[in-house]
Each structure stands twice: as C-alpha cells, then as structure tokens.
Amino acid sequence: MAAQSLLSESLLGWSIFTFILLIILAFCWVYIRKFQSRQESEVVSTITAICALSIALITSALLPVDIFLVSFMKYPNGTYKEWAANNLTRGQIEDTVLYGYYTLYSFILFCVFLWIPFVYFYYEERDDDNGNKCSQVKNALKYTIGFAIVCVVLLLIGAFVPLEAPPGQNSTQWEKVQYLFEELGSSHGLPALSFSISTLTLIGMLAVITYTAYGMSVLPLNLIKGTRSVVYERLENTEDIDDVEHQIEKLKSKQCTDGRPLSSRDRNNLQELEGKLQVLRRRGRHLEIAERNCCTKVGSALRPLKILLGVFFILVALLFTVALFISNLDKALHSAGISSGFIIFGTNLTNPLNELLLALQPVFPLDYILITIITMYFVVTSMAGIRNMGIWFFWIRLYKIRPKKTRPQALLFLCMILLLIVLHTSYMIYSLAPQYVMYGSQKYLVQMPSAGPASGNATSGTTRTCDADAPEDQCTVTRSYLFLHKFWFFSTIYYFGNWAFIGAFLVGLVVSCCRGKKSVIEGEVEADDSDLSDDEYVH
C-alpha cells in the first residue's frame, strides 16, 4: 500500500512537470518563430535557440516540483505519509530532484560554453568565408575552445574550493594536498558543477538587474498606456512624407535654377532626405497593413482587459519589490553578516509574499499555482525587458529584438541571456519567500505536556509550520535551497545584488512612466532596413 502511494505521489508530481514541459516546448517554438528573421533564418540556429530557451524554462519549472514533492510527503496534521515514513525513501525522492537539477544545469553549461558559442561564431564567420563550410567550422571551433577552457577552469576551481576548514599551519604540504583530494572525492565532484553554475549565476544576476528589473516596469505600463492610434499615425506619416518631398523638390529646383551642380553639403542633405523618404514610405506601408489587420482591431476591443492586466502586473511588481526589500532588511538585521553570506533560517519580519503562500497551503493546489506563476512571471518580464532594450554590451547596442527581423546571432544571444537569468531566478524567489522555498507547506507535530492537575504525564500534539527550529528529521529541506547555499561568498554577492535590483526597478519605473505611447508598428521599420525586408509583411 505504501509503495502504491509513493508511486502515485511521484507520478503526480512528475506528471505536472511533463505537462508543463509540453507547454514550454510549444511556447518556445512559437516565440522563436515570431521574432526570427525570415530572410536569415537557418535550421541549426533555430533548433539551437528553441532548445536553449526550452532548457531555460524547464529549469525554472523544476523549483515548483521540488517544493511540491517535499510538501506532499506530509499530512496537514504534521505526520509523514506512509510511503514517506522512511528516511531512505525521502532521501531517494529528493535525490531524484537533485539529479534533475544537476542534469539541467549540466545542459546549461553545455549550451553556454559549447553549443551556443559554436553556432554563433559559425554564422559570424559565414560572410567572411564566402560559403566555405570547412573554414567556418574551423574558425567557430577555434573560438569555442576558448569558452571550453573557461568552463574547465571553473570546474577545477569549484572542485578544489574547500567547503570545510582546511588543515592548520603546522600540517605538512602532503597533508594539505591530501586534504584537497579528499574534499574532491568525498563530494563526487558535485561542488565543481555548483561553483560553475554559481559563477554563471553572478552573470545572470547582472542580466536580472538590467533586463528583468526594467521588464517588470515596462511590461505593465505598456499594457496600461497602450499604443498610438493607427489612423493618427498614418495621417502624421503622410504629412511627414509631403514635407520631405517638398524639401527634395526645393533642392532639385535650386540646381535647375542656378545651372550649377549642388554643393557637397546640399548633396549630403539630398541623400539624407531621400533616405528618410524611403523610411517614411516603408512606414506608411506597414501602417496601412496594421490598419487592415484583424489583430489590431481585436487588440482595440480588448483594451479594457489589457488595462486590467497591466494594473495587475504593476501591483505584482510592487509586491515583489516590497517582499524583496523586507527579506533583505531581515537579513541585514538578523543574519551573521558578510562572513555567513547573510543567510538566515526562517523569517523574523513579516514578509507579505511568504505569508500569502503559507495562507494558501490549506487550499490545494493554490500555493503551487502561485509559485509557478511567480517563476514564469520573472521569465516573461525578462523577455519583455530584452525585447524593449535590445542586447547591449555596456554602452554599445549589439542587437535589436524585432518581430520577424531578428538575426540568428541575436536570438542565440537572447537565449543565452535567458539561461543566465533563469539561474538567478531561483535565488530571487528564495529571497521573496525564504521559508516557503525552504520547506514548502510542511508542518510538524510537537508533543507538549497537557495542562491541568488531572492530566498527569499525558501529552498533546500541536501542529506547527516547518522552520529552522523544527527537528531535522521532521522537516525536509528542498534541494534548491541546499544548492543555492553551497558557497557562502556567492550568497553575499547575491544579497547586494538584490539591493541593486530594487534600485534598478525604481529607476526603470520612473523612465517607463515618462515615456510616451509606443507606435502600433514599434520595431517593424528601421532606417537600415531594405525594401526586401518588407516582403514578409506585405505578402
């Protein structure tokens, strides 16, 4: 009976994960195809982008499964279910989740350091080698080896970073070397992978501060403000075309009147005006298509729903910011400081999001639905941030993310950034709801002596929510939490990164409020586009 119950509970958790997996694969295919350039699309880059994006989203979906499994080991009264009464059985289930994390994290390392760099440099070398495939592969491998060397160095550093106190000063050199090898052998090399992933998570933290913080403000405000009227935009564009044509005719008539060639300054002005006229005419064609498009009409009809959705998103963003501020303040006041990585067990200040998740526990499966929504919210807002900002390297814009016109290299960059963001998302969610991410909805039973003189030595059981004060054998910690806190110095950097995230969100909120409405054809027409690029819109 216990074995059947164990099988059913495990199947339920992994069935939910499989269902989410199918949804993720379908979403990734639609998302990549939406932004992919039809003129420069390649099968290999498309498959790489879809697979990398799928791995990112699947990794983010594993956290709710982890919380679900540890929570389902216990009844609401705090006792273990029959199939989870054995410590060995509970360990096997959690090890399954742990191996899932390490498998997906290994795939992320493979994508970030080998697969994506190779495909990226392969297409970068395509134009320079005039179609010489062998030369393309050779040059791409040459650059990819550099990334592989960085990966190996990180794995070696992680393998030999001691997690316990090293031998004293009086130890011999051999004892110190032997200690390092014992550290490596006792951990089976898992800290090596953990260190590499944590290093990538630091880069992901920078991407979260840059893109996710801005996306959390720009996505809801764009929904609330909406887009400009397509009729008004067409009228304004027509007036601009007439004005530019008048200036061109004025310059040409000047040449005919004087009978002399135009000066270099006038020729430059004429070229600029003709280029501007081409952009305005392309813009006019796109506006005409948008006015006839049924999606534009449906979007106008759904305007009230978009406003409500935008208000909901901005409230969620403000809730996250407040919860993150309280969590960081709690760490600043009640942790042991920098040397401990600002780690605290449980919560000492009232965290609204953590309390909401705990309050939803009695109504299955509302708390799991909410934690899944939170996870996907971070991913969606990150996509919105990248979509609106483009891909930057410091102050240099590398690529723009535009519907149907995004280059293969830009899509690969997009997927790599999302992979790094997802790595940091788990720590962000832990910061928002630390107690819930550690223990889920687990409770434990406390035996207390009964009150009254007639009770004698009788005891009564009291149910409490799992926290750091609970006995070790009564509450199971999620594997996500254990993975996040393997190296204290990374936790310290993440702590300060959370403060930077709060500041970036507030700045992004001010910037988004000050910006006007977007064009209905935002991102479709740029000055460096060719007329051929309009074919995929016109036909």
Image: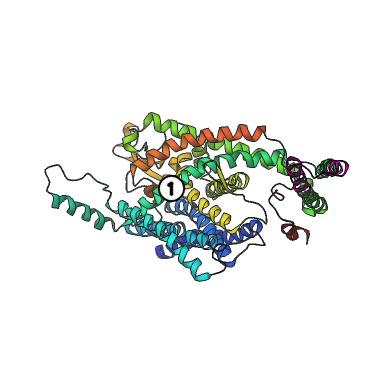
42 vs 35: above or below: below
| Residue at mark 1 | 201
Left or right for 355, reference 79: right
Q: In which quarter of the image is the N terminus?
A: bottom left
Residue 496 seen by the camera:
yes
Q: Can residue 77 be seen in this view?
A: no
What residue occupies the far top of the structure in this picture? 333
Q: In which quarter of the image is residue 105?
A: bottom left
The amino acid at mark 1 is Thr
Residue segment shown in magenta: 250-277
Q: Is the magenta stretch mostly helix, strand or loop?
A: helix
Residue 321 x/y as whole percent: 53, 35
The residue closer to the viewer here, 32 or 347, is 32
Farthest residue, direction front: 260
Q: What element carries label 1?
A: helix
Image coordinates of residue 9 in percent, x first then y, are 46, 60
Quarter of the image for residue 40 reads bottom right
